Image (tube, rainbow, N blue to C red):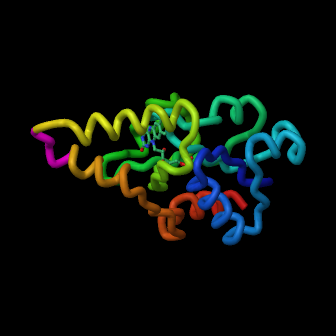
Amino acid sequence: MDAIVYVSNTGFTEKYAKILTLETNLPCYTLDEAKKQLKKGSEIVFLGWIMGGKISGLKKAKRRYKIKCIGGVGMDNPKNESDDYLIKKNRIKGIPTHYLQGGFNMAKLTGVYGFMMRTMLKSLQTKTNKSKEDVQFEKMISRGFDKVKLENLQLILFEINKLK
Ligand SMILES: Cc1cc2nc3c(=O)[nH]c(=O)nc-3n(C[C@H](O)[C@H](O)[C@H](O)COP(=O)(O)O)c2cc1C
């Protein structure tokens, strides 16, 4: 295994990548940095933030590196997000893949993603007859949260140690 490569928009995936580096001594690079630092065909663990079920950067990373393990970072409760769903949605074949709960930070969302999420929040705030899920989701995105912790990485660390 040569490195951890990641794509992060607001910093939660980056936090996971840095914890993996501390735990394994493997260097970590953004997908852009990796182009300069790693040879084509290097063996990597890939982490990417999830947008609409898709793991950002995965397609690009697959074209350049041998991906040995994948982590998809989203805001959903892990109870509602299965590894199998991620595997199907991203058409992953034969690579161990795990869902990791990251967090949400509206202040760091700019451009089109910021616009989308602010519009979603506004429509939730003005909605009448909110379901329990609506209320929970509104709280999550208006206040923001951070669920990144070492113990969520146990399955990925297990895969890395198996391959070392
Ligand atoms: C436009 C958009 C779409 C998102 N879609 C999903 C999703 O489908 N599933 C999920 O769990 N989280 C989703 N999220 C939440 C992010 O994946 C989550 O905030 C993640 O921790 C961001 O990681 P980052 O800080 O490394 O960018 C979405 C966020 C945005 C802005």
Q: Quadrant of the C terminus?
A: bottom right
Q: Quadrant of the N terminus?
A: bottom right
Choose between 58 and 132: the one closer to the eye: 132
What residue occupies the far left of the structure in this picture? Answer: 129
Q: Is residue 111 visible?
A: yes
What residue do we see at 32% from left, 38% from top? Answer: 122
What residue do we see at 59% from left, 44% from top? Answer: 48
User: In the displayed structure, would residue 163 be above or below residue 94?
Assistant: below
Where is residue 86 shown, x and y percent of the image?
45, 38
Where is residue 127 shown, x and y percent of the image?
19, 36
What residue do we see at 68% from left, 42% from top? Answer: 67
What residue do we see at 46% from left, 55% from top? Answer: 103
Residue 62 shown in magenta: no
The image quarter in which residue 56 lies: top right
Where is residue 43 shown, x and y percent of the image?
76, 47
The residue segment tinted magenta is 129-133
